Amino acid sequence: MVERERADAEVEAGEANGTEVIAHRGESGARSDDARSEFDAGPPPRWLPLVRPVALAIAILGALGAIVLAVLHGRASGERSGAHWDPTTNGPALVGSGLALLPALLAGAVLVFRPERGTYPRLALTTATWIVTLLAVLGGLWAVIATRVDLTPQVGTPVLSNAEVDAYLAEAQSTLPALAAAPIQIPTGVLIQSVEFLNANNVQVTGFIWQSYAPNMPASIARGFVLPEAVQEAYQGVEAYRLTREDGTEVIGWYFSAVLREAFDYQRYPFDRQDVWLRLWHRDFERGVILVPDFASYETTDPSALAGVDPMFVYGAWDPHFSVFSFDVPHYRTNFGYNGSTSRGGFPELYFSIGLKRDFWGPFFDHVTLFLAVAVLLFGVLMLTTNDSGRRERFGALNTAGVFGACTGLLFTSLIEQNQIRTIVAGQQVAYLEVLPFLLNGAIGLVAFNSILLNSERPARFVTYRNNLLPDLLYWPVLLLAIIVATLIAFFL
């Protein structure tokens, strides 16, 4: 430590005289073992005078790029005023304007603290500024991702009024032969009372479904519905009530509890959105019947108003953000044994979807905090990595074997936590949160490799400079920057 303070004093003295001092030599002019481990003697690198001009150019270009993108984003937002925020349009422009400022901020830290002079305070302040800046950018990205709004259902074309239903069916009638005979329409309503995810693909849904049958509805038309995606309960709705309105319309309501098997996308976990949908069929296969939304039974059809969802709904780890009816025309490649154009595969099917977004804080405390602890411990291992026997005795620093032992334990912890994430997501998908163990596993390997380089016969200058100082300084900035890049690829590219 005394030699470090003396070296910094020499550097500051050199700065006062207008010169750069970046190395320290022993009194004899040759490097001793201690000097070799603490400092890297030799002439300054040729690129050293270019640090400030390059940093100034990056700062100016980054600031200009941020201004240009901010202006473009403002114009785009003005043109789409009143529209919902769309991550595929507004998102990249907003995020891009912020990211353009990132290199400007990093270069500004170089201009302010001048790390090229080589003193510990200047290097540490530059690195600390980079870390704070990258943390702010990462937090901003997570905030944008967590608060974005997307009211589009995963399946089908959404319809919000009877006029939109008529327009959809009129357009479909020109392409679907089964609709040429003007099939019977049965208004159908849904109220969801509970949703519970049982595993990666199964979800249990309970609630009420009702249908309105006009007075002129033929008695031969069956009363009832089918949930084709239910595992066992597709035909097991329990009639809860039956009433007749003054105009003669018959209304029948059923209570249902069904386990639905659906495809969910966990690639953006823990920022994933899931659509839980009810696909509704009528019981009559052989009759031309189409289920349409019973909009008259709802106060509003605004998706964000969560019409059709019980106000006392318990969501657990999920937050609702829309509910909507939609139509979709499947292609079954079969007529289910019926001849003619009124087979099931030729009709639009009615869907009722609930959009859910995961509460980020649960996975954050479950997984992110553990990975942060592993990263901190790994940084401690890197700080204690040295080839100086004197420092090993004073601070209990680690040799190569000690570093490998510590890295093995941290790697084992990271793999166990990654396996827990794999139990949540589908087997064939890689979740965004798995970026953390992937990067940590790579960092663990690099720390172990750094120890080998440092204790080799001819170590590289990168690791011998001030006794492994550069890897210590670059650990957090590089790790945070890698997470930011992975976030951009997962959500905005």
Image (cartoon, grey):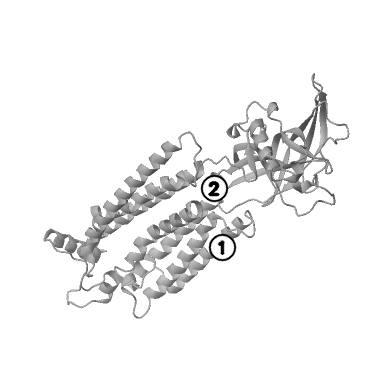
Residue 334 horizontal/vertical position (percent): 79, 53
Q: Which mark is residue 271?
A: 2
Left or right of 5? Residue 310 is right
Q: Is residue 139 visible?
A: no
Report the label total: 2
Horizontal side of 472 relative to 221 (left or right) equals left
The residue at 38%/75% (across/down) is 453
Residue 423 occupies which quadrant of the picture?
Answer: bottom right
x then y, percent, for residue 33: 28, 76
Q: Amino acid at mark 2?
A: Phe
Q: Element type at marker 2?
A: loop
Please report the residue visible at 35 percent of the width from the left and 73 percent of the height from the top.
387
Q: 481 or 91, which is in the foreground?
A: 91
Q: Which residue is mark 1?
A: 415
State the residue in front, 187 or 307: 187
Look at discs 1 and 2 and give the one toward the viewer.
2
* Above or below, comparing residue 91 to residue 19 in the picture: above
Looking at the image, which residue sits at the far left? 17
State which tag comes first along the sequence, 1 or 2: 2
**Amino acid of disc 1:** Leu
Q: 304 or 370: which is nearer to us?
A: 304
Outermost residue, right direction? 220
In the displayed structure image, the side of residue 302 where residue 441 appears, left or right: left
For mark 2, does the 10 Å Cα neighbourhood hold few (<14), some (14 to 19), or many (20 or more) residues?
Answer: many
Which quarter of the figure has residue 477?
Answer: bottom left
Rendered location of residue 96, percent (x, y): 40, 49
Q: Is residue 239 above or below residue 56?
A: above
- Residue at the far top: name it: 246
Instruction: Please name the residue shown 64% across and 50% down the image.
Output: 264
Mark 1 packing: few (<14 Cα in 10 Å), some, or many (20+)?
Answer: some
Q: Which mark is residue 348?
A: none
Q: CA distance from mark 1 to mark 2?
A: 22 Å
